[in-house]
Amino acid sequence: MKTKASTGRRVGAVVAIILAVMWAFPVYWMINSSFLPASKITSLTPTWVPFGGSWDNYKAVLDGSTGFGAAMRISLSVTAIALVICIVVAFLGALAVSRFRFKGRKSFVLAVILVQMLPAEAMFIAQYKMIAGLNLLNTIAGLSIIYVAMVVPFTLWMLRGFVAGVPADLEEAAMIDGCTRFQAFMRITFPLLAPGLVASGVYAFLQVWNEFALASVLMTSESSETLPLWLRGFSEPTQFGAVQWGQVMAGSVLVAVPVIVFFMIVQNRMTSGMVGGAVKG
Amino acid sequence: MTSPVTAPSDLDAPPPLAADEPRTPSKRPLSRRLIPYFLVIPALITLLVGMGYPVGWQILNSFREYGLAQQFGQAPEWVGLDNYIGLLTGSEFWTVLIRSVVFMGATALATMIIGIGLALLMKAIPTVPRIILQISMLLAWAMPIVAQMTVWNWLIDDRNGVLNWALSQLPGVDFIGHDWLQNPLSFFAIASIIITWASVPFVALSVYAGLTQVSEEVVEAAQLDGAHGLSMLRRITLPIIRPVLVILLLLQMIWDLRVYAQIQLLQGFGAAGIRYDLLGTYVYGLGVGQGKFGVAAAAAMIVMIFTIGLSWFYVRELLKEDD
């Protein structure tokens, strides 16, 4: 009986490793190809390990003529603007919802949930017309407006959970000790909220940074491409010649690696208890 | 990449009263009572501008003639339900709708089955291979959609792609030069495989998290009663994690119905036209592509009602869990 079970576990382990390889393979292949010269890339037999590879593809992508730098600047601006506004707006809203009772609170919470159910993919046309009407197509401001609206509901919802997780008792204790309400909030609640703010911020960042569909609708001119749009343009065949797969993969790595790193960070933050011992200890 | 699931856990529970707050709100000073409204105003404005206005515009214009002529200043004319009737009596919209539903069903089902299978596997194996599998899943999950699609497009490249090379290693098979995106069926199969690859990690890790919640005592008791293997799975494990499975399935269905970016990107890589459209790209093509904004608004409204219907089940499930 016991040997049967352990054989099963061993077979399971082998299957798991095979599946792990399958799932990671595209990611590995992206990295591998990004180091290979064009001669290896276009050879009819694949090169499995980038021995003797070089950073040439990365240099080619970064040298300026590909538009990577310009797209990076636009992505950074849009993300920074949208993120700052989103965090402030969502944080204030989350405070109201989880620290105050007021008329209309329930309707507001419901609105925040319902808005998240609206399929963005079915609102393109209207958002396009709105931004076009404001003369903001192909502008950082136009895209930022739409992005803020896109991420606020979810960020507010997430922050609401974090704010509610810091017991109001802590603030009251500080007020009994002589703090004003505002001081109590800044000295007690805010530091405890910092991890939650970081986690929500990173999630909002990932959504905005990766966003492709809305950007493709609102940023139609080549000079206003965000990074995802740039990568698409870079990887599509043109009349001037075949796709430079080595460079395209180097571009993909540059777009993906920061995202993967941030993603892994939040994964951990999300699972570790936020203010677990604050009350007890 | 997908957002995590948030449960509206205490939807109906307002925050507890602070010690210094009198029971009846009206006794507090006016300035104090106005604070929450000031806090909420920015969020309200954001929602109204970014979501409220577009939805309003869409509802209005789905009942109006709004084509190229109106683009150039002619006033849009009310046409009642004409846009909807035109869509629903023609065959084009139905073809795309049915295609999208089939695509959603196949992709969501494949994702769920593989995801559940992987979760059960993770539960049954030693720690080291499990962690390797989990990291590899996280890698795939974290990839930005555009990077995912670019890499897959390289994997299936007709001349130098690994897929065609591997298939050509089979005796008597030559796939070099085969374009996977030309035939619509093969186009959607590839799209479905890519989306499944990208969504399985979320399902597998969530189900695995659910499985670790199943208490040891229940499992032992069932074993004493003679439950083993499949009967254990069918009678004990799956029923216990059923709520998680229902929510995951609904989310997958909603996401797979709304899929836009992947299809748009694949079309850009080598196959454009209505034969390769799902709802998202179809609506976009009607509006921005052909300038039929009224009709596109109507189509978008139908899609919206459809997805909200699905989402409604999702919210109801979440609320049910809460009871």
Image (cartoon, coloured by chain):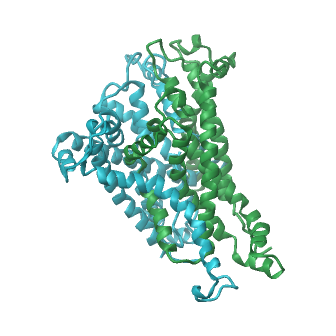
Chain colours: A green, B cyan
Q: Can residue A11 be seen in this view?
A: no
The spot of residue B156 in percent (x, y) is 45, 25
Q: Which residue is drawn at 52% across and 65% down?
A: B7
User: Which residue is the extreme one toward the right?
Assistant: A177
Towards the viewer: B55 or B239: B55
Towards the viewer: A181 or A193: A181
The spot of residue B239 in percent (x, y) is 44, 66
Q: Tell me the quarter of the picture where residue A270 sits.
A: bottom right
Q: Is residue B167 visible?
A: yes
Towards the viewer: B4 or B57: B57
Is residue A154 shown above or below A146?
A: below
Q: Residue at x 32, y 48 (%)?
A: B300
Q: Residue at x 21, y 39 (%)?
A: B92
Towards the viewer: B265 or B85: B85
Instruction: Please count the marks in the image.
Output: 0
The spot of residue A244 in percent (x, y) is 54, 17
